[in-house]
Image: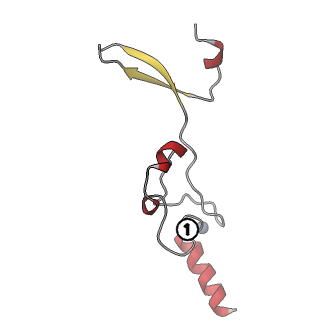
Amino acid sequence: MVAGRHKSRTLKRVHKRMPGGSTKLTFQKRKPKSAKCSKCGIELKGIPRLNTAKAKNTAKSKKTVARAYGGVLCANCLRMKLKAQARA
Ligand SMILES: [Zn+2]
């Protein structure tokens, strides 16, 4: 029977293969949800789903999109926003 602290589904259950060939149930942190566009809510491309520990050791250029509002707005919403700004 699993220990009381492992009954919660906060942690993901992963069957890991051990060096001896047997498998063992391990508990791992879940991946964060993917980044969404703040206007339309569509999933953003080029933004990886990294835990804080892994994100720390990843270059900024690999975690964002090099463009105005990169990582905040999707390309379509950005185009609309820039058009609206130019008209105003
Ligand atoms: Zn959008």
Residue sitting at x 55%, y 64%: 71
- Left or right placement of residue 19 versus residue 75 in this view: left
Q: Percent position (x, y) of residue 2?
A: 58, 11
- Front position in the image: 40 or 13: 13
Residue 25 is left or right of residue 7, and the answer is left
Q: Quadrant of ligand 1?
A: bottom right
Q: Residue at x 42, y 59 (%)?
A: 62
In which quadrant of the rendered image does the C terminus lie?
Answer: bottom right
Which residue is farthest left? 20
Q: Residue furthest right?
A: 88
- The quadrant in which residue 68 appears is bottom right
Query: Nearest the camera: 53 or 7?
Result: 53
Taking the spot 52% from the left edge, 72% from the top edge, the residue there is 75
The N terminus lies in quadrant: top right
Q: Position of residue 82 (x, y in %)?
A: 60, 83
Number of other residues with Cα within 10 Å of mark 1, as a class: few under 14, some 14 to 19, many 20 or more = many
Image-quadrant location for residue 8: top right
Query: Tag 1's secondary structure?
Result: loop
Residue furthest to the bottom in view is 87
Work out whether 40 lies above or below 21.
below
- Ligand 1 within 8 angstroms of badge 1 C-beta: yes
Q: Percent from the top left, x then y, of residue 32? A: 57, 44
Q: Which residue has dot 1 on it?
A: 74
Return the x and y of residue 29 as percentages of the image width and height: 55, 33
Amino acid type at circle 1 is: Cys
